[in-house]
Amino acid sequence: MSSVLYDTPGPRARRRNVLYTIAFGIVFCGALAYVIATMADKGEMEAAKWLPFVEDGDVWTTFLLPGLGETLKAGILAIVIAIPLGALLGIGRLSEHRWIRVPVGAWVEFFRAIPVLMLMLFASQLYVEYTAIGSEIRPLYAVVTGLVLYNASVIAEIVRAGILSLPHGQSDAAKALGMRKGQTMQFILLPQAITAMLPALVSQLVVILKDTALGGAILGVEDLMSAYRTIPANYGSNTIATLVVIAAVYIAVNFALTAFASWLEKWLRRSKRSTGTTLTTEEVEELAAPHAGGNDEKI
């Protein structure tokens, strides 16, 4: 018995996989023990460095939770703007009109090629030079701007790849029914492409939330990441402990986002609105490669 991706492993392969798993677990536990021992030798495992996160609620109410709120604010703003903008750009790349397809393609390729941190710094300087936005909120604007410009371009490729993954007969059937191009996209292609591109889209949303940390580390946004400076300044030299706790909070938030997306994908599949196809990040990159641009299906 086999699936689309691989043959079902036999008894020998299953035993080999179990041995690999055990070996990896031993190596991982050994590496973790070494890290903990090294931290203990440096005094990083002292109770005084970790107890504030358990015994002092002010650490959470003053630093971590307000910082998490700013992180979620920046992430949600970027997501709310980047998703529809990315969808429009992705559809624009599939347009049969050259005057739409070429400029949109240039926009997507340009902003996909620039590091998101550089976009944030550039946006911050633009706001300083040409706007009257106050210094207290300017870093948040810069972070959101950089995240939107970069991630909307990536989401555009996810949308384009999701639509191109559908059978060509979908568009042909819609034409045979007399549907216009906009109707075909709205009622036939996009509803089916949603679940195909959902895994790659969720991965990108997680990237957006994680990249908000650049604002706290570089631009001075008072987000969750900025707590790695303020907590050690108020509770002693516990930077490592603070970073571990911050990382745990990021993991919890992103895990919740991924779990919600998994539930949403299952719900969409039960509603029978998808083709059953899903796109991995690697497949999105393959479809987004420059050589694929000349073979786009025009919508």
Image (tube, rainbow, N blue to C red):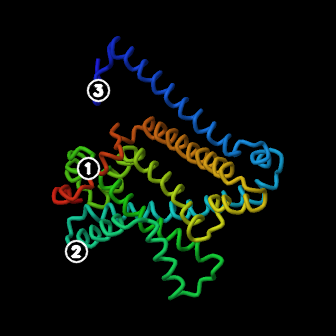
Q: Quadrant of the C terminus?
A: bottom left
Foreground mark, 2 or 3, reads 3
Secondary structure under tag 1 reads: helix
Q: Residue at x 68, y 52 (%)?
A: 242
Q: Residue furthest top?
A: 11
- Residue matched to label 1: 286
- Residue matched to label 3: 6
**Mark 3 → mark 1, Cα distance in angstroms:** 20 Å
Dot 3, crowdedness within 10 Å: few (<14), some or many (≥20)?
few
Is residue 257 shown above or below 75? Answer: above
Quadrant in which residue 181 is drawn = bottom left
- Residue matched to label 2: 99
Quadrant in which residue 297 is drawn = bottom left
Residue 278 is left or right of residue 295, and the answer is: right
Q: Amino acid at mark 2?
A: Trp
Secondary structure under tag 3 reads: loop
Identify which residue, 296 or 147, lies in the foreground.
147
Is residue 266 shown above or below 138? Answer: above
Q: Position of residue 178 (x, y in %)?
A: 23, 55
Foreground mark, 1 or 2, reads 1
